[in-house]
Image (cartoon, grey):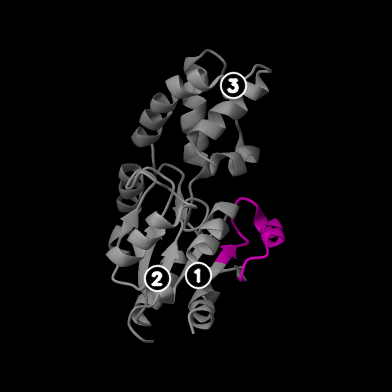
Amino acid sequence: MQSGSCVVFDLDGTLADTSADLLAAANACFRAMGEGDLLGPEDSLVAFHGGRAMLRAGFARLGRPAEEATVDLWYPRLLEAYRGAIAVHTRMYPGAVEAVEALRRAGHAVTICTNKPEALAEMLMRALGVRDLFGALVGADTLPLRKPDPAPYHLAVSRAGGEVGRSMILGDTETDLKTARAVGVPCALVSFGPEGAGIARLAPDALLDRYEDLPALAARLLA
């Protein structure tokens, strides 16, 4: 593999299943409001759209409009709850660590570009013991712009020592696909994330059904 090739990973729903800990943080807020746990495992897709989305979903379940001022008020408390219990249930997806290690051995740079706040993403990856596998990590607030704007992607690749023109993204949502299209690089989406096989509706350049297949997929997309 020639130097410069780079695989860019999304984090939540791609590298790790973080939904249970995210939902627990939202429910901590709802309990503080006196409403009890409003979200459950069936809301994992909502969890991967972020803290504010979870708060809105909970308020909707109560049958009242989610005023953005109220969402903004509780969002810092959600982050605080999440920070305090960030890796209780979160696990890397099966085969993810081995696949990243195989990519590195093949000469690819590997990096993370996530819409999770940078400090929380760093904390989580260190708690999982995998931060040192990645050449860089760019979060939602590393720059003033976040995915699908191309700027965070460019930064994630350059910090890892890769070349944007020889890179690809692996993600689990339309945001990742839009990022790839904005940058002009291939996109593979995982079929084991929150949306499951239904993610094929977005027609990415490739689908990844299991991490064991990632090294071969990357070699094909980056050829």
Of residue 196 and residue 167, the one placed in the foreground of this image is: 167
Magenta stretch: residue 204 in it? yes
Q: Please give the residue where the numbered disc 1 appears in the rendered image.
A: 185
Amino acid, disc 3: Ala
- Looking at the image, tell me whether mark 1 or mark 3 is earlier in sequence order: 3
Cα–Cα gap, marks 2 and 3: 39 Å
Residue 66 tag number: 3
Q: Residue at x 46, y 52 (%)?
A: 149
Amino acid, disc 1: Val
Of residue 112 and residue 197, the one placed in the foreground of this image is: 112
Cα–Cα gap, marks 1 and 3: 37 Å
Residue 193's place in the image compared with 99, above or below, is above
Q: Quadrant of residue 88?
A: top left
Magenta stretch: residue 19 in it? no
- Looking at the image, tell me whether mark 1 or mark 2 is earlier in sequence order: 2
Q: Is residue 30 visible?
A: yes
Residue 115 tag number: none
Residue segment shown in magenta: 188-205
Q: Residue at x 67, y 59 (%)?
A: 202
Amino acid, disc 2: Val
Q: Nearer the viewer, mark 2 or mark 3?
A: 2
Does the CB distance between marks 1 and 2 fall below 8 Å?
A: yes
